[in-house]
Amino acid sequence: MTEPLLRRLRARGERLTVAALPWVAPVYRAMPQVDAVIELPFRHGGLQLRERRTLGRQLRGQFENAYVLPNSLKSALLPLLAAIPRRVGYLGEARVGLLTHRLKNPKDKPPMVAFYSALSGEPGVESDRPALALPDAQVGEVLQRHGLARGAYVVMAPGAEYGPAKRWPHFGALAAQLDRAVVLLGSAKEAAECEVIRAQAPGQVRNLAGQTSLAEAFGLIAGAGHVVSNDSGLMHVAAAFGVPQIALFGSSSPLHTPPLNARAQVLWLKQDPDYQPPLDCSPCFQRECPLGHFRCLQDLDAARVRALL
């Protein structure tokens, strides 16, 4: 979702260095417009001022502009400590003194791509197009390692870090209906959940959750015939590679975080005029269903998804 902003900045001649935590750094290394990636040595939680001061001193004099994408206070500290003269970001968490150019946070939830792209100071959003690229040889090496043929398997990403209200419960039923190999991807925390899915179609499903690096997962997604996922990080990775995908939405909204992919098919019962009674509660953006019925994903059956594959 940040890639259109980076594409816009590069098009106007800016040389781009992205500072990112290690778990997301491979995403930016796969973006052609990014010149360099700095892996941030910070842990989750806490300001860690000593570490930020040390890195800030190392970076002084290297940059003219800083675009601060997260809304947190600590994310705006490093550009200040690095004495970057122009620091652009949204207001929030008492950041007035940390940023030189401040945008007001919109009241409603805008599409995240537009939210990030506005930091460029230019109107509009670039059109959808593949945003990540891997050499064919790298993809081929990953597929050979796992004994897979390009386009002959389906990747499923059943996890969603945000919570249960974003996780479709019928991945196992869908896998059992397919006549193709299925590869399950996700984090180590999702391995047990993926094993339950694998058990429903053990002959054709391979559970690789927690067993791949992010770069290896990229190769498996780039080589897939289809990707089926919840509204998650891997959904956006599939969109960025431009592979055929089915994106399943429940408590969240494709108007806010859509897959930017002309080959994506979005299923969201909220937008289905034939679904009754209407989902007036959606999108709630909650981690768990506050009403307890979970209709938004429970009623989206496997046969409906299977018809799109």
Image: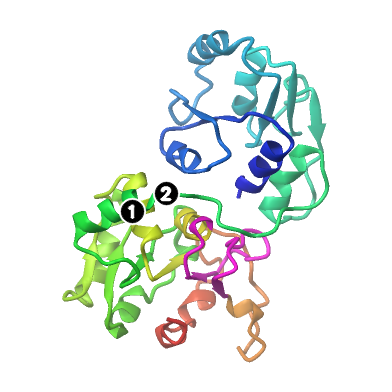
Tell me which segment is drawn in magenta: 240-267
The disc label shown at residue 134, or none: 2
* Residue pointed to by mark 1: 139
Q: Position of residue 159 (x, y in %)?
A: 39, 60
Residue 293 in view in this figure = no
Which circle's residue, 1 or 2, is located before the other in the chain?
2
Residue at horizontal 74%, vertical 55%? 110
Kindly identify the amino acid type of the residue bearing the numbered disc 1: Val
Q: Residues within 10 Å of mark 2 (few under 14, many from 20)?
A: some
Q: Is residue 216 magenta?
A: no
Disc 1 and disc 2: Cα gap in Å? 7 Å
Q: Position of residue 205 (x, y in %)?
A: 23, 71
Q: Residues within 10 Å of mark 1 (few under 14, many from 20)?
A: many
- Pick whichever, 294 or 309, lies toward us: 309
Q: Is residue 78 above or below residue 108?
A: above
Q: Main secondary structure of the magenta part?
A: loop
